[in-house]
């Protein structure tokens, strides 16, 4: 049973205790996967022949907003919409508008991560809904390499989308998964390209989630080593810049831009984790690298606001201290069978 808009006022908690886990970490950041579907099949993210969830299993927009409102009532200040690719979900702008209405009423920021393929269509509407910045995944500036990594994407569509977002006044950060033997030779050009346009750049270590058909051991590129290599070509100045997530940023003196590093494999950043992740089917994962979760869909549909609030308390009691990603050079398989597109990265 889906929650209707008329019922919604009676299902949203009016407020409650801040969300604090058993390690004293305040949860202020909710990532919401609105769909597991994507129009790309990036080699490090999903298998080429993915089996997506049936639409009947996906949370309705009303249910997503009810859950978001419950989190905001308990102190969540930032919501990020993810996928899969969030902009491929039908009528997605209706959800963006609805969640955007929480801005200034407890919610400080609404952001979105996208592959950019649909961005040209929606950039203006996203800005009107209150989104001020976007993360755009872009792992290469070479069209053929882009097609190889995404298996079906067109780089021209993504670049046009980025230009449209820029024109709409959205602040853009490029996310680049650094892969040995795949795109490591493009990291310096990507820095210069992104910073030359006023965009930030965050480099991300590949994570062992789901069977994707590539050897993650061979493509793993530790960012600690990469950062040292970059220091021989650039002046990297540490900053206290934060965007609410796990990235740690340096300023590149030669370009004036910021470069972030997300290091789930080479440096565990879990001691300051302030995030939880809601899947498109309503499972709340407490850690990207663990299977601990609470089913908010069942709580909401069977028990309404009171059960949803109790489920959030239960989630805080079981949130793990950190993930257990370890690079095993004797085993190239995934640490978890769950693909990245399920929980939205």
Image (cartoon, rainbow, N blue to C red):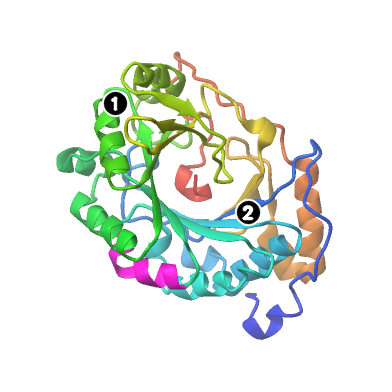
Which residue range is magenta in the image?
Answer: 117-128
Residue 283: give its label: 2
- Is label 2 in a helix, a strand or a loop? strand
- Whichever of labels 2 and 1 marks the residue nearer the N terminus, that label is 1
Which of these two is toward me, 55 or 235?
A: 235
Q: Is residue 168 above or below residue 216?
A: below
Task: Give the image location of residue 161, x and y in percent.
Answer: 28, 59
Q: Is residue 212 above or below residue 63?
A: above
Residue 206 visible in rendering: no
Q: At 32% from the left edge and 38% from the top edge, which residue is drawn?
A: 43
Which of these two is toward me, 40 or 154?
A: 154
Residue 184: give its label: 1
Task: Give the image location of residue 1, x and y in percent.
Answer: 65, 75
Q: Is residue 52 above or below residue 62?
A: above
Q: At 53% from the left edge and 48% from the top edge, which residue is drawn?
A: 343
Residue 115 visible in rendering: yes
């Amino acid at each position: 049973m889906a929650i209707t808009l008329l019922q919604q006022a009676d299902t949203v908690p009016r407020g409650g205790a801040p969300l604090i886990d058993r390690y004293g970490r305040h949860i202020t950041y909710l990532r919401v996967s609105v769909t597991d579907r994507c129009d790309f099949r990036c080699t490090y993210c999903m298998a080429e022949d993915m089996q997506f969830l049936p639409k009947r299993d996906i949370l309705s927009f009303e249910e997503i907003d009810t859950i978001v409102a419950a989190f905001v009532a308990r102190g969540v200040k930032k919501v990020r919409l993810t996928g899969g690719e969030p902009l491929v979900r039908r009528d997605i702008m209706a959800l963006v508008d609805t969640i955007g209405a929480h801005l200034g009423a407890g919610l400080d920021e609404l952001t979105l991560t996208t592959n950019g393929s649909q961005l040209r269509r929606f950039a203006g509407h996203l800005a009107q809904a209150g989104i001020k910045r976007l993360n755009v995944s872009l792992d290469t500036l070479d069209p053929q390499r882009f097609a190889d990594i995404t298996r079906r994407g067109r780089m021209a569509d993504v670049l046009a989308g980025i230009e449209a977002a820029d024109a709409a006044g959205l602040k853009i950060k490029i996310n680049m998964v650094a892969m040995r033997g795949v795109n490591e030779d493009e990291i310096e050009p990507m820095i210069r390209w992104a910073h030359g346009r006023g965009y930030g750049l965050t480099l991300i270590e590949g994570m062992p989630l789901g069977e994707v058909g590539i050897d993650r051991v061979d493509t793993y590129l530790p960012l600690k080593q990469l950062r040292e290599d970059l220091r021989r070509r650039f002046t990297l100045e540490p900053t206290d810049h934060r965007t609410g997530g796990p990235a740690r940023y340096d300023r590149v003196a030669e370009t004036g831009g910021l470069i972030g590093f997300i290091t789930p494999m080479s440096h565990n950043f879990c001691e300051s984790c302030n995030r939880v992740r809601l899947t498109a089917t309503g499972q709340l994962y407490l850690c990207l690298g663990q299977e601990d979760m609470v089913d908010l869909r069942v709580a909401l549909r069977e028990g309404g606001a009171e059960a949803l609030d109790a489920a959030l308390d239960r989630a805080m009691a079981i949130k793990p201290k950190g993930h257990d990603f370890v690079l095993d050079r004797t085993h190239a398989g995934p640490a978890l069978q769950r693909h990245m597109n399920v929980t939205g990265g």
